[in-house]
Amino acid sequence: MTIDNYSFQGKKAIVRVDFNVPLDDKGQITDDTRIRGALPTLQKILTDGGALILMSHMGKPKGKPSDKLSLKQIVPALSQALNRPVLFAPDCAKAQEQAAALKAGEVLLLENLRFYPEEEGKPVGIDKADPAYEEAKKAMKSKQKEFAKTLASYADCYVNDAFGTAHRKHASTAVIADYFDADHKMLGLLMEKEVQAVENVLNNINRPFTAIMGGSKVSTKIGIITNLLNKVDNLIICGGMTYTFVKAMGGKIGTSICEDEQLQLALDILEQAKQKGVQLVLATDTVVANRFAEDADTQVCPSNAIPDNWMGMDIGPESSVLFAKYIESAKTILWNGPAGVFEMDKFAKGSEAIARSIAKATANGAYSLIGGGDSVACINKLHLADQVSYISTGGGALLEAIEGKTLPGVAAING
């Protein structure tokens, strides 16, 4: 079932949204992107004449209630966004009466799902090394099913529109789907877009396909890099990962970040790329600093000849030109992770150059997918969001999808 061909008239829909929005000290939302992202799905249900029961998590309360992570704080902003009052259920496991009383066009927001350990399905207060852990885990899985069954009982149909948590097999993202048949569970409009975006960069590829992978550690990106080597024509490696590769090839990296235990892995990746005919591109020059600070002394030097006591902080101007050559000639582009210490303006120029090259390629007909907090922040900071094809809302979920893993939240509905 798809949301477009389902009529919500007279129906109560329980919708998993991702309202894990950042709040300031006064509980005010500082970035409402995630709420705005869910609006098309919510408006479709309300316009059809349905009632909404919304469920989300916020932060990591680890199974314990916390005023600072209560979703009650977002009720005013949500009411404004939906242009109608939003009711609140302070206990999501005991919202039967409120759900039953809902009329068409009304909205009920449940309290933070993660106040309940049953949501994540992990035993609380017991170490994995404890012999009793497995038994506790089994008992918690049983409780998780009951919790999901309770949530499902509030509604006639289930909609998952939370791509950011689609890689989690939680009560509200996957288990709940077991209590609805195929005609009464569906992906929301945002989820459909996210799934399609991943499909575009992994399976509907226009070539050449260039992926730009940033970040500090090779170890956290190895699954993605390995999967991409079977798909891409060009793989640009940037960010802190650069220096592990440079050192593996015998270069001098000063005090730059490096995973010494991954040097052989870096050499293996270089060899795999060569065998698969993938052009693996590394920065040729680097902006280095004498300390990790915005006001540090800087210079530009070759990436493989960084002086002692200096550290790589960003790609150099020569590398920006080199990367642009591969990005601007691409027809499919994936960007995850900045080129340098993007948080400091002094070391954000490389990431900005990548963002502008992607926008240029997109204007020339390329399909571009941006994912990962820093890459998205860079695109937004430069006001280029409307000049790329798609910006993903899901960090971990996007990475696992690119890695080729099945996302439980999607599989629970699509099978």
Image: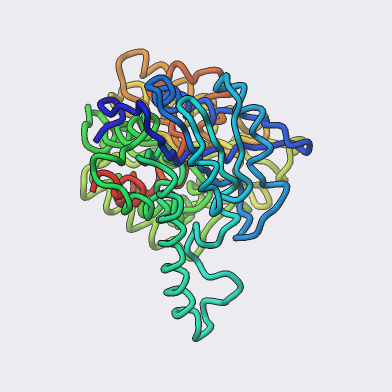
Q: How is the rendered protein coloured?
A: rainbow
Residue drawn where x is 53% and y is 49% of the image: 216
Q: Nearer the viewer, residue 284 or 183?
A: 183
Q: Where is residue 49 in the image (x, y as percent from the top left)?
A: 40, 23
Q: Position of residue 52 (x, y in %)?
A: 47, 33
Residue 402, image quadrant: top left
User: Is 201 placed left or right of 239 in the picture?
Assistant: left
Q: Where is residue 122 in the image (x, y as percent from the top left)?
A: 50, 66
User: Is 342 placed left or right of 104 in the picture?
Assistant: right
Quarter of the picture holding the N terminus? top left
Residue drawn where x is 51% and y is 28% of the image: 106
Residue drawn where x is 41% and y is 28% of the image: 50
In the rendered image, the vertical position of residue 177 relative to residue 47, given as above or below: below
User: Is 72 placed left or right of 286 in the picture?
Assistant: right
Residue 388, image quadrant: top left
Residue drawn where x is 55% and y is 62% of the image: 117
Q: Is residue 113 visible?
A: no
Q: Can residue 374 be seen in this view?
A: yes
**Exactly how many numbered labels are in the figure?**
0
Residue 381, image quadrant: top right
Q: Position of residue 99 (x, y in %)?
A: 50, 41
